[in-house]
Amino acid sequence: MGYASTAALPPLITADFFEGRAYGGIFGWLMAFVGIGGAFGAWFAGFLYDQVGSYLPVFIIMVIGAFSSCVSIWWAAPRKIRLVPGKRKND
């Protein structure tokens, strides 16, 4: 349920930043790195639990990562709204 509610966001955010002919390649590479990070993250969480005996450090790292990604997207976001072709400004 949690993933299904956010599955549409990565392609939309990426399209806002990298529109044009290169979008497919950029989005493909981005999703490849997301997959690698997801696989490594699960392994790292288990490794850290084995070393420390608690998932608390993993949760702290996850919260820091989520916060830093939100700040990064906000910081890199375009400051002007791009008009969609065929739409008027007041629609």
Image (spheres, rainbow, N blue to C red):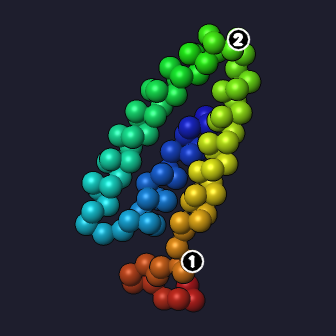
Q: Residue at x 61, y 34 (%)?
A: 1
Q: Nearer the viewer, residue 76 or 86?
A: 76
Q: Residue at x 69, y 14 (%)?
A: 52
* Pointers 1 and 2 in contact (C-beta within 8 Å): no
Tell how many labels: 2
Residue labelled with disc 1: 79
> What is the x, y in percent for residue 45?
58, 22
Q: Nearer the viewer, residue 3 or 67?
A: 67
Residue labelled with disc 2: 53
Q: Quadrant of residue 61?
A: top right
Q: Is residue 61 left or right of residue 30?
A: right
Tell me the quarter of the image containing the C terminus: bottom right
Q: Is residue 29 left or right of residue 75?
A: left
Label 2 amino acid? Answer: Gly
> What is the x, y in percent for residue 62?
64, 35
Using a 10 Å C-alpha cutoff, classify the residue at mark 1 as few (fewer than 14 neighbours), some (14 to 19) or many (20 or more).
Answer: few
Label 1 amino acid? Answer: Arg
Q: Residue at x 52, y 73 (%)?
A: 78
- Helix, strand or loop status at disc 1: loop
